[in-house]
Amino acid sequence: MPKGYWIGHADIFDIARYKDYQAANAEAFKKYGAKFLVRGGQFENPEGLSRSRHVVIEFPSYQAALDCWRSPEYQRALALRAPISLLDLVIVEGYDGPQPS
């Protein structure tokens, strides 16, 4: 079964309050087996549009990624983040097929 991923690009307007969101989202992320692959960090934007912060979160399955987003635990955290940020987020199924050789 392919893994699931959240891929997000955000602008944060109040870092102090964003830390409250980070503390609150830990409950949902732990419950649904989330693993951060990218969390902020240095980046270049060679093409297209960008925001100031990027995140890639891996889940054990696409369904777990969807369930986490829809969970009451994450929705409580989201209520803390939404007023102090802009976020573009996709939830995507991973790929288990052939790779270039």
Image (tube, rainbow, N blue to C red):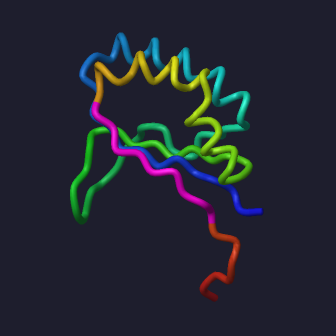
- When asked about the image quadrant of residue 44, the answer is bottom left
Q: Quadrant of the N terminus?
A: bottom right
Residue 79 x/y as whole percent: 42, 18
Q: Nearer the viewer, residue 26 or 61?
A: 61
Q: Quadrant of the C terminus?
A: bottom right
- The mark total stands at 0
- When asked about the image quadrant of residue 25, the answer is top right
Q: Main secondary structure of the magenta part?
A: strand
Q: Residue at x 28, y 16 (%)?
A: 14
Q: Residue at x 42, y 37 (%)?
A: 40
- Asked if residue 46 lies left or right of residue 30, the reply is left
Q: Residue at x 60, y 86 (%)?
A: 100
> In this view, which residue lies farthest toward the bottom?
101
Q: From what the image shows, is residue 47 above or below residue 22?
A: below
Report the span colored magenta. Answer: 86-94
Residue 57 x/y as whole percent: 57, 44
Residue 61 x/y as whole percent: 71, 52
Q: From what the image shows, is residue 49 above or below residue 69?
A: below
Q: Residue at x 57, y 34 (%)?
A: 70
